[in-house]
Image (cartoon, helix red, strand yellow):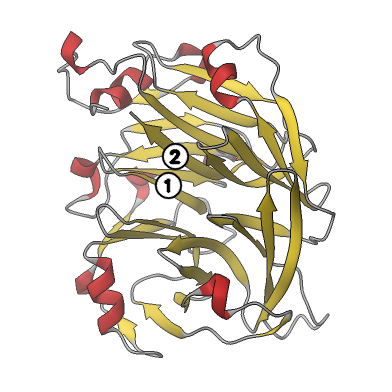
Amino acid sequence: MKKTKFIYLGLIAAASFVSCSDDDDNSASDIPDETDRAELYVTSGNTGNVTVYDFSTETPMEQTIQASGSSNEGVYYEDDSDELFVVSRSSNQVNTYIGIEYFLEDPAFEIEDGISSSSDLESPRKIAVDDNIVVVADNADVDGDDSTDDGRFFVYTKTADALTLRNVVTVDFAVWGITFKDDHLLAVVDKTSDLAIFENFATSFTETATEMATKTITIEGINRTHGITYDDDNDVLVMTDIGSADLDDDGGFHVITDATAKLNATADGESLALGDQTRIAGASTMLGNPVDVAFDEETRTIFIAEAANGGGRVLGFSNSDYEAGGDVEPSINNLLSGANSLYFHEED
């Protein structure tokens, strides 16, 4: 895909996108082939719908998938099975939907319900998938004591016809965003600036038990982290900072390049220095409560689900926007009520 796919995104009238880019190189050679796929899936806590921004044609399209439930948070797309995973906060389960590719080609196509987990969850937030392992972060108070922080990871195994709860890992910190880095689960430590790393998660944390992270480090400069994503092709880790949950203009995000070496070099209990990161924050960013993040590996565009500013936005920052850090305008700014999680998928 070419970088101009994001400029064309500004032309989607139905999506009310505002493009701030000055790049006007919209030549025909930059238009993605119709056989290429690139989609951004965004859930809403207000409607339960999944909004899909489809960049696969000359004129990008916005589609809506009416997923089950009135509130969803946590989304993942599996291209091998053409299956969309959506975590329902209203029914406390994971649901899947089949036929997404056909729906994007023809919106009249009826997406089929796939499989669903049992209603095990209490307050699900984000989802991460590694092969047949599906992990959901749940931030319900485990011990009933508001003065102590805790959370859980519900671990499911997926087959063609079932999502089965394998075990539940309880931790001594409040959870929110999660992502896989190879076989390691990276989890934000909510209410702090910390990152917890669970090495070889699927094979090392197999029992229903209270567990400790393999390593926990502090990401200097973050006030309260929420969203996290990792891209292995570029070895880039991105974490968001919601600042104060009550404010809609004090958020930001941190970009950590050469992430593997930097994480490995930071010992358990130590801090990753701000000088080893790039911080993007300020009034121009429109970041207040950036609760989730996704990364386009080819164009190095960072997408943000912003929950507070404007009642919900989908923001996009191109590499040229954020590489120097500071207070920068997003290249993409779309109002989307209740935006709370997102996932970017691309294939040639």
Residue shown at the point (65%, 77%) measured from the top left: 206
Does residue 287 sit above or below 318 in this rendering? below
Q: Earlier in the sequence, mark 1 or mark 2?
A: 1
Looking at the picture, tell me which residue is in the foreground, 338 or 6.
6
Residue shown at the point (73%, 32%) measured from the top left: 67
Does residue 232 sit above or below 50 in this rendering? below
Kind of residue indicated by mark 1:
Ala
Left or right relative to 320: residue 101 = right
Please tell me the numbered disc located at residue 101: none
Does residue 9 sit above or below 342 in this rendering? above
Q: SS class of the residue under badge 2?
A: strand
Residue occupying the far front of the picture? 160
Say few, some or many: other residues with alpha carbon within 10 Å of mark 1 (under 14 / 14 to 19 / 20 or more).
Answer: many
Does residue 80 sit above or below 276 in this rendering? above
The Cα atoms of the two marked residues, 1 and 2, are separated by 6 Å
What is the quadrant of the C terminus in the image?
Answer: top left
Question: Measured from the top left, where is residue 319 in percent x and y?
Answer: 22, 43
Residue with the mark numbered 2: 344
Q: SS class of the residue under badge 1?
A: strand
Residue shown at the point (25%, 38%) measured from the top left: 299
Question: Measured from the top left, where is residue 79 in percent x and y?
Answer: 50, 36
Question: Measured from the top left, where is residue 200 in percent x and y?
Answer: 48, 75
Left or right relative to 298: residue 114 = right
Looking at the picture, tell me which residue is in the foreground, 339 or 156.
156
On the image, which quarter does residue 265 sit in?
Answer: bottom left
Can residue 295 be seen at all in this image of the molecule? yes
Residue with the mark numbered 1: 294
Contact (Cβ within 8 Å) of mark 1 with mark 2: yes
Residue shown at the point (27%, 50%) measured from the top left: 327
Kind of residue indicated by mark 2:
Phe
What is the quadrant of the N terminus in the image?
Answer: top left
